[in-house]
Image (spheres, rainbow, N blue to C red):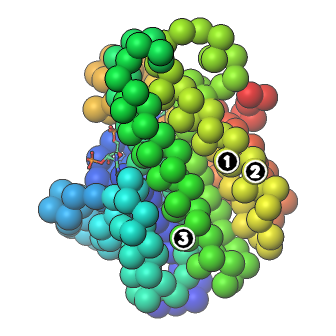
Amino acid sequence: MSKDIKVALVTGGNRGIGYELVKQLAQKGFQVILASRNPEVGHEATQKLKELNLDVSFVVMDVDNQESIRQAAITVNERYGRLDVLINNAGVYLDENEKLLTMDASILEKTMATNFFGAYYCLYSFIPIMEKHGYGRIINVSSGYGEMREMSHQGVGAYKLSKLALNGLTQLVAAEIKGDIKINAVCPGWVSTDMGGPSAPKSPKQAAESILWLATIGPEGPNGGFFRDGIRIDW
Ligand SMILES: NC(=O)c1ccc[n+]([C@@H]2O[C@H](COP(=O)([O-])OP(=O)(O)OC[C@H]3O[C@@H](n4cnc5c(N)ncnc54)[C@H](OP(=O)(O)O)[C@@H]3O)[C@@H](O)[C@H]2O)c1
């Protein structure tokens, strides 16, 4: 592998925004690792991209499972010895608009496990690989629902809290991190995926385009920010 080729990993890369992020990163010349919790589905998605002559490989990773994340990091380190871009994209939206205090509390726990702890344990396992080379670009795929003002309105409580916490995590880790490693959060907008539904105005392709500029920012670029369509949100 040439030293100039950068390696990127996308969680939940088998469908939706994640799949489009993998595709566009590969089209930009990255060597991309598509991470998916389902080996069959993940291999299938990877194969589809390989047929387009894109440089994509597969790793199995369930972000609800710390050991699965740890093993994936070992695999990436053994296979490439580096990681330049990490996109924490995997997410769930399990709310059915019930009130936080009357809904089944396992919905909150499951949502936090994927959307918050999943991203946290990915940072925990993958930042040390970035630190070896003193370089990294991390993007946490968040949501406008994670803005503080959203907490004043009832509904979608589990999802909102998970993305609020993800935004906080982004800022805290940005303050801790050393070297040319940058971490930012981004809201992709309302996107027509399985999660967003067919009425959403933005395509996964457009969403990925609005996210990926953060993968190639220079050393003077932002750190700890939260962005939508390239504009920093004061959340
Ligand atoms: N769509 C929108 O309008 C919208 C708006 C704001 C933010 N977002 C955020 O954008 C991100 C991508 O959303 P999307 O619209 O592309 O959703 P999606 O079509 O539902 O895809 C979600 C992806 O996350 C994966 N995933 C879920 N739980 C996982 C786990 N435990 N381990 C590994 N992968 C897991 C899914 O894998 P499986 O196929 O195995 O289930 C799938 O690949 C999410 O973080 C979401 O919160 C989306």
Residue 49 at x, y = what percent? 27, 62
How far apart are the alpha carbons under marks 3 and 2? 17 Å
Point out the quarter of the image occupied by ligand 1: top left
**SS label for mark 1:** helix
Q: Residues within 10 Å of mark 2 (few under 14, many from 20)?
A: few
The answer to whether residue 56 shows anywhere in this view is no
**Residue 233 to residue 224: above or below:** above
Q: Give the left or right position of residue 178, taking residue 192 as reference.
A: right
The residue under label 3 is which amino acid type? Ser
How far apart are the alpha carbons under marks 1 and 3? 15 Å
Report if the CB atoms under discs 1 and 2 are less than 8 Å apart. yes
> Which residue is nearer to you in this view: 86 or 47?
86
Identify the residue at image location x=42%, y=21%: 201
Residue beneath disc 3? 125
The residue under label 1 is which amino acid type? Leu
The answer to whether residue 62 shows anywhere in this view is yes
Residue beneath disc 2? 172
Residue beneath disc 1? 169
Residue 59 at x, y = what percent? 32, 70
Q: Quadrant of residue 211?
A: top right
Q: Residues within 10 Å of mark 3 (few under 14, many from 20)?
A: some
Q: Give the left or right position of residue 233, taking residue 140 as reference.
A: right
| Disc nearer the start of the sequence (1/3) | 3
**SS label for mark 3:** helix
Location of the C terminus by quadrant is top right
How far apart are the alpha carbons under marks 1 and 2? 5 Å
Residue situated furthest top in the rendering:
153
